[in-house]
Image (tube, grey):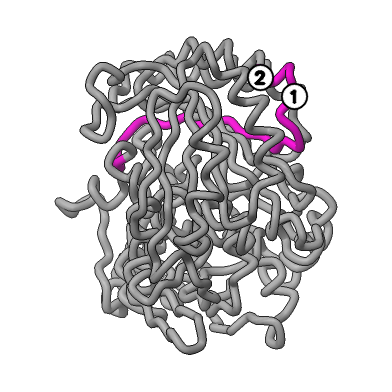
C-alpha cells in the first residue's frame, strides 16, 4: 500500500468512526458478522464489497451519510428495496446509504393519498392502502422497493387504468448532494419534481414519497390471475393478444410472457415444468361487470389453465414473490416495443422453446390507456406512445448456470432487438447496459442533464443509470 493509499484509508476510517457516533441506525463494516448479509442484494449475481453499509433509521441519518461521503471523498450509493437489475444499490469501496429500515406508511383514506418512507416495499404500501379499497400503481412484485420502481417510472397492473407510478406521485422529500433537505412537488422545486418522475436516483436521496391512491375493484378485490397456453399455440395467442389488448376496457390489463409453469399447487401437477405462453390478467372494475369484461379472455383458444379468480389486489401483486425470492442469479436484457410484429413473434417462439431454466422468462408489459395519454414531456419517463416494455430475464438459483442463462438472454435479445422501438425502460437496464441511459430518456435527456447540473453538479449520485450534469 502506498503512502497516499494509507492516508486515504486512515481518513476513511476516521470518517466512518465519526459517522457511526452520529447515526441512530447501524453502521456495518467488513469487521461485523452481519456484513455479508447487509451487502447482499436481490440479484445474487452481484457480489460487491462496500466500505460500509449505513442502515439509516431516519432522515437525519441520511443527511449525515451524504455529508460524510461528500466531505471525505467517499463513493455514495443508495439502496432502497435492493431489486435493481444491475445491483446498483451496492458498490465496491462505497458507503451504502441503506434505507431499508425506514418503512413507515401513513394513509389518508379521505384524501386518497399515502405517504411512504424511502425504504418501503410495495407490500408495505399495499398493506396500508388495499384494506381501504385503494392502491397506488406499482409493478408486478410486492417485494420490489418503492423508491427504485417509482423513480424509474413504474409500469404495472394498474398502468392502463391509472397510469404509471410517477403519474400518481404528488411530492417527495429529498436529501440533496449538499446535505440539504427539500420537498419537491408541483409548486416547490418543480424542475426537480419533474426529474424525479422517471429520472432514477440521479438527483438525490428520496426519503419519503407522497402518492395518490385510486379505487381498485370492490373494496380492494380484483379479478386476476394467469391464463396459460401450450407453447405451440404461442404465435396464435400473441397475434390475438396484440389486437385485443388496445380494444379492452382500461379496467382490464394483462402482461404477456413465455414461462415454465412452476411446481405450484395452483397448477395441475402434470403441467409442472411445462414451457408455456402466459397472460396474467388484472381486472379492477365493478364486480358485476367482471364476467362480461373477461369473456373474450375465457373464450379464446384452448387454454391449459384459466386461473382467473377474485382476490385482494395485494394477493395478485405478491403472487410471484415466492417464485422470485431474493438471492437468485439474474441477467436482464430489455427494449421498448410499439408493436408485437410477426418477426418478433417468430423470435419469441424460437427462444421460448429454449427456455434454459425454470425461472427464466420473457415478459411484455403494456403501456397504453391512461399511461399513454400523458405527454412524453410531462414527466422524465418518455415512453408514452403506447406499446410494451419488454424484458428478457435469465434466472436460476445456481451460480453454475449463470453462463447458460446469460447466453440465452443475450442471444434472444440480439435477435429480437431489431423489432423494437429502440428505447428502453430504465428500471430494466443491467450493469453492462449503463451506456443505454441516454436512450432510456429520449428527448427528455437534455432537460434531465440541465436539472442534474442544478441539483448535483459534481455528480455525487452517479452509481446508477447515470445522467452526467450538463456542462
* Residue appearing at x 78%, y 35% in the figure: 421
* Residue appearing at x 41%, y 17% in the figure: 275
Are the residues flagged by discs 1 and 2 in contact, CB closer than 8 Å?
Answer: yes
Nearer to the camera, 5 or 206: 206
Q: Which residues are magenta?
A: 325-345
Residue 172 found in image quarter: bottom right
Could you tell whether 132 is left or right of 344 in the image? Answer: left
How packed mark 1 is, by other alpha carbons closer than 10 Å (few <14, some 14-19, many 20 or more), is some
- Relative to 298, does residue 464 appear above or below in the rendering? below
Image location (x, y in percent) of residue 449: 77, 60
Nearer to the camera, 212 or 412: 212
Residue tagged by mark 2? 345
Of the 4 image quadrants, the one containing the N terminus is top left
Q: Is residue 377 visible?
A: yes
Residue tagged by mark 1? 341
- Relative to 277, does residue 182 appear above or below in the rendering? below
Residue 95 found in image quarter: bottom left
Image location (x, y in percent) of residue 266: 26, 35
Q: Is residue 429 visible?
A: no
Q: How many marks?
A: 2
**What is the secondary structure assignment of the residue under circle 1?**
loop
Amino acid at each position: 500500500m502506498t503512502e497516499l493509499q494509507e492516508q486515504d484509508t486512515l481518513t476513511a476510517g476516521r470518517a466512518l468512526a465519526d459517522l457511526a457516533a452520529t447515526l441512530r441506525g447501524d453502521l456495518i463494516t467488513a469487521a461485523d458478522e452481519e456484513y455479508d448479509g447487509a451487502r447482499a442484494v436481490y440479484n445474487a449475481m452481484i457480489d460487491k464489497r462496500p466500505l460500509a453499509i449505513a442502515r439509516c433509521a431516519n432522515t437525519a441519518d441520511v443527511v449525515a451519510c451524504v455529508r460524510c461521503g461528500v466531505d471525505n471523498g467517499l463513493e455514495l450509493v443508495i439502496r432502497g428495496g435492493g431489486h435493481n437489475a444491475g445491483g446498483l444499490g451496492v458498490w465496491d469501496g462505497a458507503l451504502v446509504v441503506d434505507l431499508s429500515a425506514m418503512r413507515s406508511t401513513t394513509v389518508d383514506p379521505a384524501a386518497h393519498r399515502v405517504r411512504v418512507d424511502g425504504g418501503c416495499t410495495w407490500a408495505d404500501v399495499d398493506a396500508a392502502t388495499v384494506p381501504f379499497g385503494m392502491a397506488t400503481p406499482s409493478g408486478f412484485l410486492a417485494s420490489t422497493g418503492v423508491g427504485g420502481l417509482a423513480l424509474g417510472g413504474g409500469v404495472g397492473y394498474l398502468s392502463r387504468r391509472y397510469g404509471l407510478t410517477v403519474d400518481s406521485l404528488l411530492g417527495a422529500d429529498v436529501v440533496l448532494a449538499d446535505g440539504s433537505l427539500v420537498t419537491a412537488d408541483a409548486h416547490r422545486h418543480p424542475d426537480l419534481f419533474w426529474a424525479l418522475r422517471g429520472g432514477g436516483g440521479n438527483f438525490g436521496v428520496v426519503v419519503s414519497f407522497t402518492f395518490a391512491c385510486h379505487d381498485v375493484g370492490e373494496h380492494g378485490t380484483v379479478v386476476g390471475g394467469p391464463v396459460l397456453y401450450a407453447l405451440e399455440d404461442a404465435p396464435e395467442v400473441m397475434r390475438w393478444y396484440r389486437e385485443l389488448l388496445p380494444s379492452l376496457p382500461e379496467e382490464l390489463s394483462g402482461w404477456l410472457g413465455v414461462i415454465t409453469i412452476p411446481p405450484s399447487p395452483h397448477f395441475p401437477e402434470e403441467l409442472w415444468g411445462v414451457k408455456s405462453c402466459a397472460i396474467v390478467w388484472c381486472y379492477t372494475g365493478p364486480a358485476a361487470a367482471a364476467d362480461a369484461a373477461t369473456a373474450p379472455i375465457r373464450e379464446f383458444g384452448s387454454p391449459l389453465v384459466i386461473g382467473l379468480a377474485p382476490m385482494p389486489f395485494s394477493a395478485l401483486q405478491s403472487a410471484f414473490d415466492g417464485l422470485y425470492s431474493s438471492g437468485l442469479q439474474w441477467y436482464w436484457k430489455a427494449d421498448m416495443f410499439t408493436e408485437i410484429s410477426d418477426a418478433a413473434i417468430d423470435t419469441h417462439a424460437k427462444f421460448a422453446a429454449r427456455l434454459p431454466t425454470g425461472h427464466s422468462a420473457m415478459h411484455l408489459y403494456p403501456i397504453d390507456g391512461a399511461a399513454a395519454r400523458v405527454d412524453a414531456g410531462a414527466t422524465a419517463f418518455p415512453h408514452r406512445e403506447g406499446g410494451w416494455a419488454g424484458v428478457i430475464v435469465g434466472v436460476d438459483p445456481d451460480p453454475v448456470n449463470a453462463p447458460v442463462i446469460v447466453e440465452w438472454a443475450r442471444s434472444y435479445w440480439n435477435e429480437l432487438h431489431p423489432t423494437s422501438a429502440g428505447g428502453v425502460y430504465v428500471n430494466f437496464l443491467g450493469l453492462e447496459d449503463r451506456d443505454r441511459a441516454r436512450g432510456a430518456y429520449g428527448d427528455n435527456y437534455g432537460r434531465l442533464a440541465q436539472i442534474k447540473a442544478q441539483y448535483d453538479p459534481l455528480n455525487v449520485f452517479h452509481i446508477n443509470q447515470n445522467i452526467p450534469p450538463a456542462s
